Image: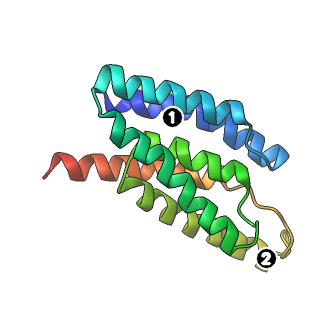
Amino acid sequence: MEYLMVILFLVFSIPACIIDIKQKRIPDWTVFSGVTVIIAFRLLILGDLIKIILLELISAPLIFIGIRSITKGKLGMGDVKFAALMAIYIGFPGWFIATGVASLLGLLFAVLGLFSGRLNRNTRIPFAPFLTVGSIGAYFVNYDILLNI
C-alpha cells in the first residue's frame, strides 16, 4: 500500500518539478489535484481521520507562509501550496524531515552553483524538485520507523 501512495505523490509532483525547473513556477492543478486524490485515498482506502488530514493540510502551508515572510518572498507561493501536497502525502513528523532534507539539498545546489559561476545571488532556484526528493526519502524513513515501533 505504501508504494501506491508514493506513486500517487509522484504522479502530481513530477509534473510540478518539470514545470518548476522550466518556468520557475508550480501550477495549481498539480498541487490541488494531488491533494484531492491523496486525501480521497487516505480517507477511503487507508481510513485516516479527517481531522488529522485537515491539520496537515492547513499547518504545513502556514509554516511555509511564515518562512516566506521571514525570507521576504524568496520562497514562492507555489512552494507554499506544494507544502500542502507534501504534508498530505507524508504526514507529520515526516514533513519536517522532508523539508529539512530539501533545504539542505537546495542549499548545496545553490552553493555549488555559486562557486561554479553557473548561478548568481539573484538566480531563482526551483525548489519543488528538492521538496519531492526530500518527501520521498522521508516517507520511507518515516514509514520504516513507524513500523518498527
Residue 125 placement (x, y as % from top left): 76, 61
Mark 2: secondary structure? helix
- State the CA–CA distance, disc 2 to disc 1: 31 Å
Residue 123: quarter of image: bottom right
Residue 23: quarter of image: top right
Q: Is residue 126 left or right of residue 129?
A: right
Pick whichever of labels 2 and 1 is earlier in the sequence.
Answer: 1
Residue 62 placement (x, y as % from top left): 56, 57
Residue tagged by mark 2? Answer: 114
Q: Residue furthest bottom?
A: 115
Residue nearest the observer in this picture, 32 or 5: 32
Residue tagged by mark 1? Answer: 9
**Quadrant for the N terminus in the image:** top left
Q: Residue furthest top?
A: 44
Q: Is residue 5 left or right of residue 147?
A: right
Q: Which residue is painted at 71% across and 62% down in the image?
A: 75
Which numbered disc, 2 or 1, marks the residue closer to the eye?
1
What count of labels does the image hold? 2
Other residues around mark 2 within 10 Å, as few (<14) / some (14–19) / many (≥20): some
Q: Which residue is painted at 29% across and 32% down in the image?
A: 48
- Say which mark, if any, is on residue 70: none
Residue nearest the observer in this picture, 120 or 25: 25
Residue 60 placement (x, y as % from top left): 50, 54
Q: What kind of residue is marked 2?
A: Leu
Q: What kind of residue is marked 1?
A: Phe
**In the displayed structure, would residue 18 be above or below residue 96?**
above
Residue 112: quarter of image: bottom right
Residue 21 placement (x, y as % from top left): 77, 48
